[in-house]
Image (cartoon, helix red, strand yellow):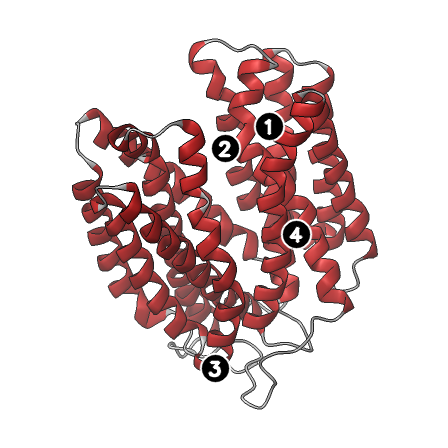
Amino acid sequence: MNLTLTQPSLPRARHVHRVAVATWFFLQGLIFASWASRIPFVQQRMGITDGQLGLVLLAIPVGQLPSLPLAGWLIAKHGSRRVLLLGVVLYSLGLLGLGAAPTVGLLVPCLVLFGFASNLMNIAVNTQAVGVEGLYQGRHIMASFHGVWSAAGFVGAAIGTTMIGWQVVPLPHFALIIGVVAVLATLSQGRILTHDAQADANQPIFVRPDGPLLGLGMIAFCAMICEGAMFDWSGVYFKKVVQAQGAWVGAGYTAFMSTMALGRFGADWLTGRLGPRRVIQLSGVLTAVGLLIAVGVPTLVTALVGFVLVGFGVSSVVPLVYSAAGKSKVMSPGMALAAVSTIGFLGFLIGPPLIGLVAGATSLRVSYFLIAVMGLCVTWAATKAKQL
């Protein structure tokens, strides 16, 4: 493993690198949550309907999809550090553009840039995380990085809520966020890894994913179908099926997000004792059980319990899959992560519309039952995966 350490002591050096990379996960989560917190304001300012907003927001995945293979190629050629620095600049510019765009015609290209930069930064920072995890010689720490991303989401949402309360429009709000990002990025960029784990200048950049990587991609695909459904449909489920009132409509989403973040901070400890395969198997079972509880007994209390279990269930799957993908023997870490992320991302895109299509033909409860089946598919795919 070719890594450049910035401190003479390995324990000290790896701690420095870990804090630095965690900072970049925080910055990525902060930028994303800042935009998400102001979507209702942007919708109201531009006078667009819910249906029109859904079409406009498709610009983000339009930008994300091409950036996945490109990110892997750039990282293999130039290293994750340079790509991460490029990504944060583009991500910040995209956020600033979203705050400044006065019309839908200008908002859409900014969303494409925002989506493109988000995955560019995502693959690069996860490649860094794979390298730092390698310094810990078998100890799992990947999930904690993703926990920092989730925690940043709560911070970004809280800042957004405060800005809305103070009647601050998005542009100065986003400018403030970019200022914070610039300061933290400047302070930490010198402490991230300068060389990637398993970097090999002679390794082919484009290699067809082997069976083990495809197996990891299938786990990510099933898990991210569940995640996408929970992100986009939790509020609708609580309103229409649970028939929650007032602020309780958002309680399911809050419960899911809270336990997903909490689960990520505890997943590394659990993985060290059970191993990644068993943890992912358990995660799939928890996801399925939680959804079946919410579907079978859709009262407020039971649905909340179910969504809590789903949050714990999905929390560790993607971090552990990324960790395993970064150890591929046939592809560079960046390319392997890009390959697995592409397969998983398709699940994230398919999940929400699949819920809508099935709900339209049957009911929302039937849709959530099918998502529970996807949780069991995570367990099955983990049993078959060769690289865990």
Identify which residue, 237 or 157, lies in the foreground: 237
Whether pointer 1 and pointer 4 mark residues with C-beta atoms closer than 8 Å, the reply is no
Q: Secondary structure at mark 2?
A: helix
Point out the tag, 3 or 1, that comes first from the N-terminus: 3
Residue 255 visible, this orientation: yes
Whether pointer 1 and pointer 2 mark residues with C-beta atoms closer than 8 Å, the reply is yes
Up the image or down, 351 lies above or below 361; here it is below
Q: Residue at x 22, y 32 (%)?
A: 163
The number of numbered discs placed on residues in the rendered structure image is 4
Q: Given the image, on which type of amino acid does mark 1 rest? A: Val
Q: Which residue is mark 1?
A: 308
Q: Which residue is mark 2?
A: 258
Q: Which residue is mark 3?
A: 77
Badge number at residue 94:
none
Q: Given the image, on which type of amino acid does mark 4 rest? A: Ala
Residue 239 x/y as whole percent: 53, 15
Badge number at residue 220:
4
Residue 80 x/y as whole percent: 44, 72
Q: Residue at x 47, y 63 (%)?
A: 67
Q: Given the image, on which type of amino acid does mark 2 rest? A: Ser
Point out the tag, 2 or 4, that comes first from the N-terminus: 4
> Disc 1 and disc 2: Cα gap in Å?
8 Å
